[in-house]
Image (tube, rainbow, N blue to C red):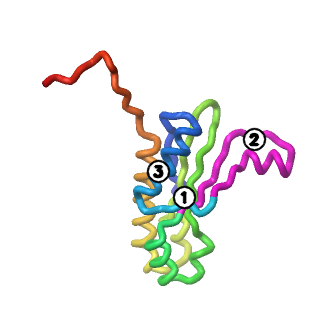
């Protein structure tokens, strides 16, 4: 079972990041952390690694429910969503909480994890969807 959910974006890196942030908000997530892995590795190691961004996303009501069910669940929070370039394509991946939290052994987390995962999958799907472009030469029929 994959620990992540991944889709190829129809847009470039910067546009994908912007769209991802908008889609996270629509599902009730805020971005708590933003890590530019490329810049960090360049600064710390002097290496070029390619564009790679980690967003730490949190849905406060669902995080609160999870913390009420399991105090130590914070080691899995926030939920990471990444955007990276690989071989000319832009990819978006999100953690799958049903997989990561399954080893906790707390049945109370299962429903919360599924809800979060469903929301993150929707975010990734909408972020990576085809961009519909209007053709100015085509007019809809009346």
- Residue 24, above or below 136: below
Q: Which numbered dot is residue 22?
A: 3
- Residue 87, above or below 69: above
In whole angstroms, how far apart are the C-alphas of marks 2 and 1? Answer: 22 Å
In whole angstroms, how far apart are the C-alphas of marks 3 and 2? Answer: 26 Å
Point out the image quarter for the C terminus. Answer: top left
Q: Residues within 10 Å of mark 2 (few under 14, many from 20)?
A: few
Which badge, 3 or 2, comes first in the chain's sequence? Answer: 3
Point out the frontmost of discs 3 and 2.
3
* Residue 142 magenta-highlighted: no
Horizontal and vertical percent position of residue 128: 46, 41
Q: Which numbered dot is residue 55?
A: none
Q: Which residue is mark 1?
A: 95
Residue at the extreme left of the image, as rendered: 142
Point out the frontmost of discs 1 and 3.
3
In whole angstroms, how far apart are the C-alphas of marks 1 and 3? Answer: 18 Å
Which badge, 2 or 1, comes first in the chain's sequence? Answer: 2
Q: Residues within 10 Å of mark 3 (few under 14, many from 20)?
A: some
Q: Secondary structure at mark 2?
A: loop
Q: In the displayed structure, does residue 131 sit left or right of residue 20?
A: left
**What residue is rendered at 48% in x and 83% in y?**
69
Magenta span of residues: 34-57
């Amino acid at each position: 079972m994959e620990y992540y959910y991944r889709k190829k974006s129809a847009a470039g890196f910067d546009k994908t990041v912007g769209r991802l942030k908008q889609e996270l908000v629509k599902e009730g997530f805020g971005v708590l952390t933003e890590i530019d892995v490329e810049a960090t590795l360049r600064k710390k190691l002097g290496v070029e690694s390619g564009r790679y961004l980690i967003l730490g996303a949190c849905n406060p009501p669902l995080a609160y429910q999870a913390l009420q069910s399991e105090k130590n669940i914070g080691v899995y929070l926030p939920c990471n969503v990444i955007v990276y370039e690989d071989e000319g394509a832009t990819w978006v991946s999100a953690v799958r909480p049903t997989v990561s939290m399954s080893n906790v052994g707390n049945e109370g987390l299962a429903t919360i994890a599924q809800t979060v995962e469903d929301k993150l999958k929707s975010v990734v799907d909408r972020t990576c969807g085809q961009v519909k472009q209007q053709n100015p030469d085509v007019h809809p029929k009346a």
